[in-house]
Image (spheres, rainbow, N blue to C red):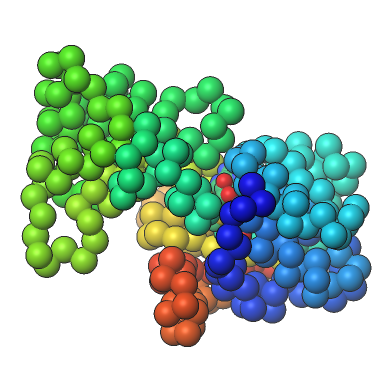
Amino acid sequence: MSDVPLVHRSVLLDEVLGYLELDGKRLVIDATLGLGGHSEAILQAFETVQVIGIDQDTAALSSARERLSRFGSRFRGFHSNFTDIKMVVKEAGQSSVDAIIADLGVSSMQLDDVSRGFSFRSDAPLDMRMDATSGNDTAADLLATLDEEEIANLIYKYGEERKSRRIAKWIVERRDKGKPIQTTAELTRLVERAVGRSSKDKIHPATRTFQALRIAVNDELGILDKFISDSVDLLKPEGILCVITFHSLEDRIVKQAFQKLSGKCFCPPRIPRCVCGAEKRVDILTRKPVVPSEAEMNENPRSRSAKLRVIRKLAQ
Ligand SMILES: C[S@@+](CC[C@H](N)C(=O)[O-])C[C@H]1O[C@@H](n2cnc3c(N)ncnc32)[C@H](O)[C@@H]1O
Ligand SMILES: [Zn+2]
């Protein structure tokens, strides 16, 4: 994949480097390696640091390995889901780490690779699995097997699409006629017709439906809580966890997970004692999420929705 242009500067790069506090430190996990941009900057800036990179996408992994090969044994890449971060760290022969970064969602490479089926701007099989080797259901499989209500709920919950019921109805009607949705272009046209296109829309009408399917196919929200608590287990005292999100559903989960880890109780009011397991294990370093500068947003439109939240594990 050496012909992939490494055009984008990684999102919130200076801000992440600032928060990671890596002077004299030893080991960082990049849980979403992607094109290896954050890892490269870390390896370049901090000579004592080794990076373990994780990505569930084999194409991303091999392109990052190539990009980072000049750092020799200071970089090691693993093909895995970050939900298995503890297993990866063990496999790497380590038991604790100084810092962890996760820059969630899809990479520009995945979006630009037409064949992966992430984009409504081109025609391809409706796949959307970040790990194409996984054997998990593709987006087309979900639309072929879920019932109408399940499809509607999925598009509403993960896409915040108000016309989810209508879209689901049209998908199932088409399926019942023996023409299940199989490609991105078929889905795009169906959503355009079901939702209609208003000149006031800032985004393409299929954006929300595509986002919903991508989140469902990759279980993007379901795995975050476990990843965050496993990460805190792995951090050394005073270790840092940085998480960058790209939409409000993700950001809400990260914000609440961080609040809970900082001791905030989420039990319903009037309950006599805390049963939600809130226990202070970290300090929150970002009272409000850090967002990209105007300059970064102009240079890289994808960064517009990015939010960085950071926690530091307590000293003991
Ligand atoms: C936004 S990109 C990361 C870009 C990277 N920080 C850079 O600077 O080049 C996100 C990457 O994380 C990977 N990814 C997303 N969810 C994952 C998960 N649950 N486990 C492992 N990798 C994941 C995607 O395959 C993608 O390559
Ligand atoms: Zn509680």
Number of marks drawn: 0
Using the image, determine if residue 105 lies above or below residue 263: above
Q: Position of residue 248 (x, y in %)?
A: 38, 60
Q: Position of residue 8 (x, y in %)?
A: 55, 67
- Would you say 297 lies left or right of 191 here? right
- Would you say 59 lies left or right of 76 here? left
Residue at image coords 54%, 63%: 244
Nearest to the observer: residue 82 or residue 209: 209
Which image quarter is the C terminus in? bottom right
Q: Position of residue 16 (x, y in %)?
A: 65, 72
- Would you say 255 lies left or right of 158 here? right
Q: Quarter-wise, where is residue 17 in the image?
A: bottom right
Using the image, determine if residue 23 lies above or below residue 272: below
Residue at image coords 45%, 50%: 111
Question: Could you tell me if residue 252 is visible in this image?
Answer: no
Considering every residue shown, the one lying at the far front of the view is 3
Nearest to the observer: residue 257 or residue 276: 257
Residue at image coords 78%, 57%: 68
Q: Position of residue 218 (x, y in %)?
A: 47, 38
- Would you say 103 lies left or right of 183 here? right
Question: Could you tell me if residue 25 is visible in this image?
Answer: yes
Q: Quarter-wise, where is residue 40 in the image?
A: bottom right
Residue at image coords 11%, 38%: 166
Using the image, determine if residue 144 lies above or below residue 256: above
